[in-house]
Image (cartoon, helix red, strand yellow):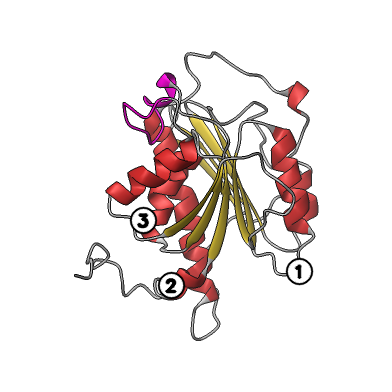
Amino acid sequence: MTKVYNSRFKDAPWYEKSKDENILIVGAGGIGSNTIYNLAKTVVANYAIVDMDVVEEYNIGTQFFQAGQELKFKVESVISNVKDYGCLSTFIPVTTEYEDDMYYPITITCLDNMKTRKQCFDVWKDKEDRELFIDGRLRANLYEIYVVKPGEEEAYEKTLFDDDETDDGNCTFKQTVYVGMLIGARITQIIVNHLTNKYDEDGESFCVVPSFIQEFTEPFYINIKNKLDNDTNIENKQNTAST
């Protein structure tokens, strides 16, 4: 019997064609697990998910894992969970460190260190068929998303810094589940807008794909830029995804 979980959105202009999309997600923790839930249930693509970590007890409170999954690989656990929630996407789980031969035209980094983030970006920026590089950064009460399109690489590189410059912050206030879901939903929105433009039959790019989104929860402040520039407010110099 054919599953009808998608009956409320299966006629979206990007839905059927998205089944041929290949999307790489590096990191399945604070940002990645919530992104995978939102994105893979919406855009029924082919996902490669890279993370060598296992689920720790403290991950269960804020990330998309269940009690009883402790010490299991995060990648395998989150894939199991989204399938239990009716996800129809396909997955390639990778439970090793990121390697330079891991590449898809749409790459999303959900990381807690700059070294791997830079490594992923260096691989992506040298590919002729690159489309989007999305970099998520997260704290308990704020998130930032950088979206790099071909030709915008130089501006994005100015936002990168070394890991020894980061502020680890208070280890008992590093993440909240609602902000994790906010960033996961925003990344999904960006991908949907990109695919809507890509598959528009008239060739019109009418959906906004911003280059920068920053949201602080307490003041309810959202900063959106359609182009990165020297005035972009980089507040989040920190290890930015709970592991």
Secondary structure found at label 1: loop
Q: Residues within 10 Å of mark 2 (few under 14, many from 20)?
A: many
Q: Residue at x 43, y 53 (%)?
A: 39
Q: What's the residue type where badge 1 is placed?
A: Glu
For disc 3, the marked residue is 41
Q: Is residue 118 above or below residue 23?
A: above
- Front residue of 80/118: it is 80
Whether residue 229 can be seen here:
no
- Front residue of 60/130: it is 60
Secondary structure found at label 2: loop
Q: What's the residue type where badge 3 is placed?
A: Lys
Q: What's the residue type where badge 2 is placed?
A: Trp
Q: Pinpoint residue 49: horizontal percent, then vertical percent.
A: 54, 48
- Front residue of 144/5: it is 5
Which residues fall within the magenta stretch?
57-70
Main SS, magenta residues: loop
Instruction: State yes or no: residue 52 in magenta.
Output: no
**Is tag 2's residue or tag 1's residue first in the polypeptide sequence?**
2
Q: Residues within 10 Å of mark 1 (few under 14, many from 20)?
A: few
Image quadrant in which you'd find residue 203:
bottom right
Determine which of the numbered discs, if any, sits on residue 33 in the image. none
